[in-house]
Image (cartoon, helix red, strand yellow):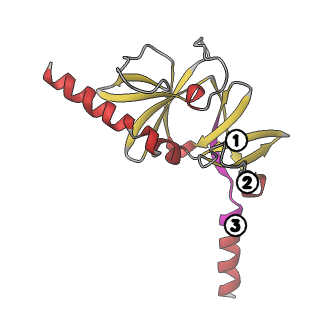
Amino acid sequence: MQTTQGTVVQQLATEAASEYLTFTLGSESYGIDILKVQEIRGYDCVTRIANTPAFIKGVINLRGVIVPIVDLRIKFNVGEVTYHEFTVVIIINVLNKVVGIVVDGVSDVVALPAQSIKPAPELGASLDTRYITGLGTLNDEMLILVDIEKLIGSDELQIVDSTVENTQKEAVNL
């Protein structure tokens, strides 16, 4: 009987829904693990840092913490980037870093059961899909699920660390 109960508990845990904060980039809907989200803010002026890639918009001072701002629209090459009243910054906390990501708008928090998430398709070497954990379906809408830890932890975004460190050093020396 104990084995059956253990199996049932394991099965229920597997079938439990995961919660995602959904947001838009262009015409597509994306989702990130809600547990990584610290807060959502309107897009405000950022301090540009010289010699950084275009997708790193700069840094902001968030209650005494220097936070790098990454524009996912530029990073994912999602058409023309415009800033308006719906543009928001999602402040996330991943890999012991606080980072802001700029998106077109935040939609909702949704619970997706495991059976409604399919693996990301293999699209060949020309398209980098390692940041995509899967594709979820919700009310006949496709949701691209992003592994924000893999994205922020990637080699090309390690420049974020050095940018923040250099900015903090410069602030101390002033």
Q: Which residue is at the far right? A: 140
Mark 3–mark 2 distance (CA, rounded to whole Å) = 11 Å
State which tag comes first along the sequence, 3 or 2: 3
Q: Is residue 151 above or below residue 60?
A: below
Q: Badge 3 local density, few (<14 within 10 Å), some, or many (20+)?
A: few
In the picture, measured across the screen, residue 53 lies left or right of residue 124, that is: left
Q: Residue at x 68, y 65 (%)?
A: 14
Quadrant containing the C terminus is: top left
Residue 105 position within the rendered picture, expressed as x and y whole percent measured from the top left: 63, 24
Q: Is residue 125 above or below residue 49?
A: below
Under mark 1, the amino acid is: Ile
**Residue drawn at x 43%, y 34% as measured from the top left:** 99
Question: Residue at label 2?
Answer: 113
Q: Give whichever of discs 3 and 1 has the lower sequence position.
A: 3
Residue beneath the point at 78% across and 52% down: 116
Residue that badge 1 annotates: 144
> Which image quadrant for residue 26?
top right
How many neighbours does mark 1 have within 10 angstroms: few (below 14), some (14-19), or many (20 or more)?
A: many
> Which-is-in-front pick, marks 3 and 1?
1
Answer left or right for 8 relative to 75: right
| Magenta stretch holds residue 91 | no
In this view of the protein, which residue sits in the foreground, 41 or 144? 144
